[in-house]
Image: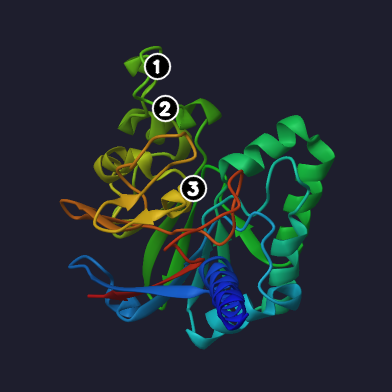
Amino acid sequence: MLKKYRKLIYVLLIAVFLVCFWFWQNDSLQVTRFIINYENLPQEFDGYRIVQISDMHGKYFGRNNKRLVDRISSLKPDILFVTGDMMTSNKYDGQAFIDFLEEFGQQCPVYMCLGNHEQIAGMIAGDEYYTSFIKSIQEHGVILLDNEKTTLKKKDESITISGLTLALFRYSRRDKEYYDEALFLTEADIDLSIGEAEEGFNIMLAHNPVYFSEYASWGADLVLSGHVHGGIIQVPFKGGLLSPEHVFFPEYDAGLYEIEDSIMIVNRGLGSSGVNFRLFNRPDITFIELRR
């Protein structure tokens, strides 16, 4: 009888551990920090503090996302960049992001690019859903860059922020035989969408990281992306297991990447789409400090 009780206790302890581990992996926020040095960064932006979030997909961290707001506020950002998929196209879950914005207030400017789920929402869920979501986030102060540029000024110096919206076919797997190389994104395609890179320092918000080499050749000094959700499972010494396009061990899954003078940061995202599961891949807040 004593042995049976011991076994039951062990099973309960293991169950409690697994539940706690599950919560920790899927509901506890992690801040990923980077300090990036640039020779061409304007002097006024030396020490500039950037926070990036991505891929919320209706996820809540506390009431009205207050835990998320508090964690970001503690970082004292100069600007908040949002790199798409803050809703899920077929779940009507954009309220989580709107509640976050309500709680966040006007702590700092908020800039956003579109992800594939926002784009799809207007197509399959109807224009009213998408339009009301976009209208609401803009009323809460979000500056949406849908194939647009803007200039951020500090005193007499400035940097350019561009938001690139990729056509949905650009999210197709490029390793498939039927995918024509003529459909690959090029520097010229980016020029057609948002124009040539401006002189000086350029930050690009682009939801899909797979085209980093094209973003770099276009002239982006810093690219901020998401989309891959950290590969769902981070396999030790190997990286993210699976991309949304069902590519195993995608080239750009999370973290920092460099091509010559260009740097890309891929955020692991906050929520989940399709596979509601994370392992060794906690919800991610990216903090970047720019230095000259």
Please name the residue shown 37% across and 14% down the image: 180
Q: Amino acid at mark 2?
A: Arg
Q: What residue is shown at x 43% (from left), y 31% (from top)?
A: 192
Q: How is the image coloured?
A: rainbow
The answer to which of marks 2 and 3 sits earlier in the sequence is: 2
- Quadrant hosting residue 140: bottom right
Distance between mark 3 and mark 1 Cα atoms: 20 Å
From the top left corner, tell me how far across and down residue 205 is, in percent. 45, 52
Considering every residue shown, the one lying at the far front of the view is 1
The quarter in which the C terminus is drawn is bottom left
Q: Is residue 248 above or below residue 159?
A: above
- Tell me, for residue 173, which label it has, or none: 2
Say the numbered circle drawn on residue 179.
1
The earlier-in-sequence mark between 3 and 1 is 1
Q: Nearer the viewer, residue 218 or 16?
A: 16
Nearer the observer, 164 or 21:
21
Percent from the top left, x then y, of residue 25?
Answer: 51, 68
Secondary element under disc 2, as helix, strand or loop, is: loop
Element under label 3? loop
Quarter-of-image position of residue 188: top left
Q: Residues within 10 Å of mark 1 (few under 14, many from 20)?
A: few
